[in-house]
Image: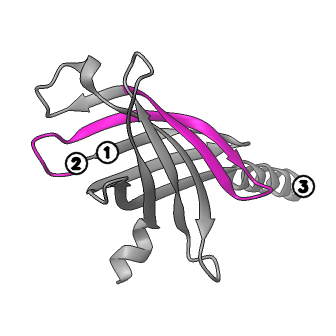
């Protein structure tokens, strides 16, 4: 019985270790320095990332988009892209939405869990519609502040 419990504990530990959840709040900063509030909730398992982003939080244009991509453990970086609109408060046609492609990495001392990087946005026809920087902090760190 003791061996079975140890085996179950070991399996659960391995499963929980291979899966990471990330919740971040911050901003997209467009190339003209215009900020847009932004959040992401990501689930990573074995380098595969899925989740969602929310732009224009608490505004008439708030939009939730599905995200997928990759996490590279060796350099602690992400390559992510919005792949579809999940919901929006905007009345604009879906073909006018700008889908973001992001390259992000962890920054800061002592594992402060800050994510920074660059993004480009494209319409569905691949025409570029935006570019700039992304600055995000882990949600739990922001609440402490």
Q: Earlier in the sequence, mark 2 or mark 3?
A: 3
93 shown above or below 59: above
Look at the image and give the residue range highlighted in magenta. Answer: 56-84
Q: Residue at x 37, y 24 (%)?
A: 123
- Using the numbered discs, state the Cα–Cα distance from disc 3 to disc 1 in whole angstroms: 46 Å
- Label 2 near label 1: C-beta < 8 Å? yes
Q: Position of residue 52 (x, y in %)?
A: 41, 40
The reply to whether the magenta stretch includes residue 72 is: yes
Q: Quadrant of residue 86?
A: top left
Q: Position of residue 61 (x, y in %)?
A: 15, 40
Dot 3 crowding, Cα within 10 Å, few <14, some 14–19, many 20+: few
User: Which residue is pictured at 25% across the width and 30% down the height?
Assistant: 87
Which residue, given by chain and number where applicable, does mark 2 sit on? Answer: 56
Q: Position of residue 7 (x, y in %)?
A: 85, 51
Q: Dominant secondary structure of the magenta stretch?
A: strand
Q: Residue furthest right?
A: 3
Disc 3 target residue: 3
Q: Which mark is residue 54?
A: 1
Is residue 63 covered in magenta?
yes
14 vs 120, left or right, is: right
Rendered view: 71 above or below 29? above
Q: Residue at x 62, y 59 (%)?
A: 105
């Amino acid at each position: 019985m003791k061996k079975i419990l140890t085996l179950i504990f070991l399996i659960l530990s391995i499963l929980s270790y291979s899966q990471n959840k990330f919740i971040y709040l911050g901003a997209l900063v467009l190339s003209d320095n215009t900020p847009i509030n932004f959040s992401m909730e990501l689930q990573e398992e074995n380098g595969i990332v899925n989740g969602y982003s929310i732009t224009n939080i608490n505004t008439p244009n708030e939009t939730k988009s599905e995200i997928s991509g990759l996490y590279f453990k060796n350099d602690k970086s992400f390559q992510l892209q919005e792949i579809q609109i999940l919901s929006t408060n905007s009345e604009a046609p879906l073909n006018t939405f700008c889908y973001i492609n992001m390259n992000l990495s962890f920054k800061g001392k002592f594992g402060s869990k800050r994510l920074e990087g660059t993004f480009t946005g494209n319409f569905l026809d691949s025409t570029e519609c935006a570019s700039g920087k992304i600055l995000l902090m882990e949600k739990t760190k922001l609440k402490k502040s």
